[in-house]
Image (cartoon, rainbow, N blue to C red):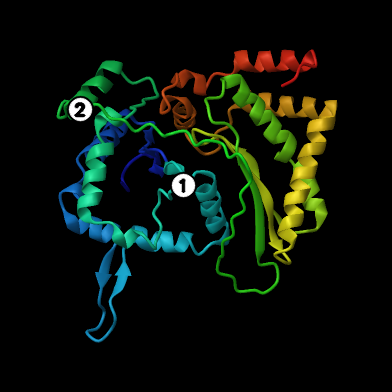
Amino acid sequence: MKSSLNTFLNAFTYPDRTCYPVASQNLKDFYNLVNVYLDAVLFPRAVKDPQVMAQEGWHYELDKEDDPLSRKGVVYNEMKGVYSQPDNIMGKIELESLFPDNTYGVDSGGDPKVIPSLTYEQFKAFHEENYHPSNARVYFYGDDPVVERLNLLDSYLSEFEERKVDTKVGWQPLFSEPKKIQGSFPSTSEAGKYMASVNWVVHDKPLSSEDKLATSMLSHLLMGTSASALRKALTDSGLGEQVLGGGFDDTLQQTVFSVGLKGLKSEADSEKVEKLVFDTLSKLAEEGFPEKAVAASINTIEFRLREFNTGGYPKGLMLMLGALSEWIYGGDPVNGIRFEQDLAALKERLSKKKPV
């Protein structure tokens, strides 16, 4: 794709979806890229040639006759690198402990310890079951002719028969009591080699769009700035070197709240981190936030929504990601990007000092 005029070309893997976005401001180039992507996604060589899976997934290698067999592979080596980072190991442990009963407890990138157990037959069957057009959401953004889009899609999708595909993610029931999980990670230093985090699955049924917006505001109040209540309490405690986790994460079907510290001096400090988090949250629940902090937070959230600063990413891509937050779970994709009504309702409740 070196000769392409693309403004974005990539693929994203989530625990419950894979996205293949492409963008270009040149229409001819854009349709050429769409053709390439549709062909690669719907008719991949990987499900016809075991050598592709061996190269990209895993395989044995022997450099010299007397050497022991070694495992290699593009994804296998990538994930070994991922699992060499303490923060990634912590994230894996958090999701495994929070979601023991559904797909979110399994690493979608692949655990290097388990990748070598994947057979070509399993890989092919999984692709045929899940990467079928009946399980896809197709999204276009731009002013290109709609009929031309549909004709292009039809040239590929007409090769398939519609089928019923059930890929709904089951809801993880909330725990009735706390659980404590311990894990380990590679470390080259003796000091500051402990980490601790406190985590919750926030809900076990769909949240309204207004509740999601309120959660964003609460996340900003707790963790959004260095002066935010929970982040400041953790930073000022001196228990660790750096705050771990960003508070609320609504990327998946069920919102998660995670926060903690890394660089603890001893394992015993993990109990102190837990107590500090609970004490701070309990105090905030009882006393509430200062009115100035609430006003600043809602203003910040509103400014972000209206400005819609996508950085270096195409605007259409960010709108797609917002729409998918509802779409893949059976909701209205437009609800993932609209905000005016919910923002007005939230501001009214705050102005009347009603509970949020």
Residue 72 lies, in percent from the top left, at 31, 67
* Nearest the eye: 154 or 335: 335
Residue lying farthest front? 176
Tell me which label, 2 or 1, sits earlier in the chain. 1
What is the quadrant of residue 263 in the picture? bottom right
x 43%, y 63%: residue = 80
* Image quadrant assignment for residue 309: top right
Q: Give the side of residue 51 with respect to residue 140, left or right.
A: left
**Residue at horizontal 72 percent and vertical 16 percent from the top:** 347
Q: Which residue is mark 2?
A: 157
Amino acid bearing label 2: Leu
- Seen at 36% across and 60% down, the residue is 114
Cα–Cα gap, marks 2 and 1: 33 Å
Secondary structure beneath label 2: helix
Does residue 24 appear left or right of residue 157 in this picture? Answer: right
Q: Amino acid at mark 1?
A: Gly
Residue found at the far bottom of this picture:
66
Measured as percent of width and height from the top left, residue 303 is found at 67, 25
Most foreground residue, 180 or 116: 180
Q: Which mark is residue 105?
A: 1
